Image (cartoon, grey):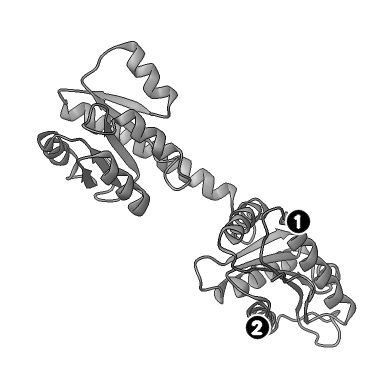
Amino acid sequence: MENPKAHTVLAVDDSPENLDLIKNILEPYYHVKVAVNSELALQIAASQLPDLILLDIVMDGTDGYQTCLQLKAQDKTRNIPIIFLTAKHSEEDEVHGFRIGGNDYITKPFSPSIVLARVRTQIQLKTKSDLLEKLASLDGLTEIPNRRAFDAALERQWNQSKRTGMPLSLMIADIDSFKQYNDFYGHPMGDECLKRVAGALQSITHRPEDLVARLGGEEFAILLPNTDSIGAMLRAEQYREAVEALKIRHVSNNPTAFVTISAGVASLRAHAHDQYAILLKAADDALYQAKNQGRNRVCANNLTEIP
């Protein structure tokens, strides 16, 4: 059985008696939330993100099928598994439930052992799916978000900027003379350097919406939503200083003889027809300027912030 209270199940039924029965069956093993109608279920699902939803099909007002469709239409709740609760036994009803996104059925009257077994199976599948999704979004060496996770976050924040009109800033950083570091110290030390730099960048990233990612090789990106060009430059300097403060010896990196980064910063208020590629290019151009001006510095693309 699962670790006690490690997961949350939301039970949705307009019958208080059915909800009491489900709670009695599941509460020794799971946190159980209840909702007596579709509207309350949608609110709880979006705010608390349960691991599983038990959803009655026949309810007053919005039925379980419609509730399922609404859950699957929202990014936050689309991946929560759903077990339908039903007194219906027709093959057509079951097929329809699976087609709209249901994962399983439990028929009434409830058998406690069946309820527990099917809930446990769906929780286990969700846990494994979540782990695989997390591993797929992390860089294997540094254990920070990878390029795939960065691209998804950039698209999401870009669309958010379009909706709100708030600025979105991007910093692209590159470890200076990293090829020479690998050549002199060897690739195992190079890997250790990458991990320490990633840790330094991550350690001063405190806002939950900010993202530090490894794009590949010695290149990192930091996404700063709701941050204008002035704020982004201040943050970028903090990141540069954090790496320099590691004091990792690098005899080929003149004039400091320590590992440093160069960074390019760009800020935009996304417009309706803009593509986020323009933000990437602007930050990359600014990084190129930082490299050309001597490295271990931050440059901003001053033409990128659109009022």
Q: Marks 1 and 2: in contact by CB < 8 Å?
A: no
Q: Is residue 82 left or right of residue 159?
A: left
Dot 1, how many residues are within 10 Å of its Cα: few (below 14), some (14-19), or many (20+)?
Answer: few
Dot 2, how many residues are within 10 Å of its Cα: few (below 14), some (14-19), or many (20+)?
Answer: few
Q: Which quadrant does the N terminus fall into?
A: top left
Which residue is at the front of the view, 8 or 271? 271
* Residue 36 point in image, percent of width and height: 19, 40
Residue holding disc 2: 234
- Looking at the rendered structure, the kind of residue marked 2 is Leu
Q: Which quadrant does the C terminus fall into?
A: bottom right
Which residue is at the front of the view, 37 or 34? 37
Q: Residue at x 37, y 38 (%)?
A: 124
Answer above or below: position of 178 versus 37: below
Q: Give the spatial CA distance, label 2 vs label 1.
A: 23 Å
Residue holding disc 1: 277
Marker count (numbered):
2
SS assignment at label 1: helix
Answer above or below: position of 245 versus 182: below
Q: Residue at x 34, y 18 (%)?
A: 94
| Furthest residue in direction bottom, as rendered | 255
Which residue is at the front of the view, 2 or 187? 2
Q: Is residue 73 left or right of residue 214?
A: left
- Looking at the rendered structure, the kind of residue marked 1 is Ala
| Furthest residue in direction top, as rendered | 91
- The nearer-to-camera label among 2 and 1 is 1
Q: Quadrant of residue 140?
A: bottom right
